[in-house]
Amino acid sequence: MDRKVIITPDAPSPIGPYNQAVLAGDTLYISGQICIDPKTGDLKKKDIQEETHQVMRNLKAILVASYMGFNHVVKTTIFITDMNKFSEINEVYGKYFDGDFPARETVQVAALPRFVNVEISMIAIK
């Protein structure tokens, strides 16, 4: 099976021993993204909306680098630290899809890298 590592300067560099994404055949596995601004390295977390938008922009950059878009996404996983913010995250997340939503689960966790509030990973197929 063909396996290609996807790296783009338009998304944050990994903060550990992993890649932004791996394309295996026609399936793209995108590592969990947090609200790091790839230009500055700063966290964009004024509020949960800004944080979620930055996460989605980072995911979009990786999709674009793989010649895909949100319409190729078949599965997402959302990790959040406070389920009470689910509706605000969901509102922002939903704006990035044209009504063709992927399968998804949302899980509340005790903590996330760099103590952010939301992390999202995706699987997309060409």
Image (cartoon, rainbow, N blue to C red):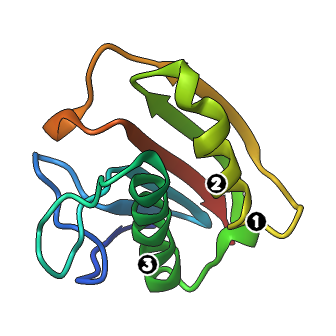
Task: Decide if residue 120 is on the left or right side of residue 14.
Answer: right
Whether residue 76 is visible, yes or no, is no
Q: Residues within 10 Å of mark 3 (few under 14, many from 20)?
A: some
| Circle 1: element type | loop
Q: Residues within 10 Å of mark 2 (few under 14, many from 20)?
A: some
Tell me, for residue 97, which label it has, or none. 1
Q: Residue furthest right?
A: 99
Q: Residue furthest top?
A: 110
For residue 68, above or below residue 77: below
| Circle 2: element type | helix
Residue beneath disc 3: 61
Counting from the top left corner in percent of width and height, residue 87 is at 67, 36
User: Which three-letter amino acid code belongs to the residue tagged 3?
Assistant: Ala
| Circle 3: element type | helix
Q: Nearer the viewer, residue 10 or 21?
A: 10
Q: Earlier in the sequence, mark 3 or mark 1?
A: 3
Report which quarter residue 38 is drawn in: bottom left
For residue 31, above or below residue 124: above
Residue beneath disc 2: 93
**Which residue lies at the image location 41% right of the left edge and 39% below the top edge?**
118
The C terminus appears in which quarter of the rendering? bottom right
User: Which three-letter amino acid code belongs to the residue tagged 1?
Assistant: Phe
Task: Decide if residue 76 is on the left or right side of residue 102.
Answer: left
| Alpha-carbon span between mark 2 and mark 3 | 15 Å
**Which residue lies at the image location 39% right of the left edge and 17% below the top edge?**
109
Counting from the top left corner in percent of width and height, residue 107 is at 53, 21
Q: Mark 1 and 2 residues: CB-CB less than 8 Å, in contact?
A: yes
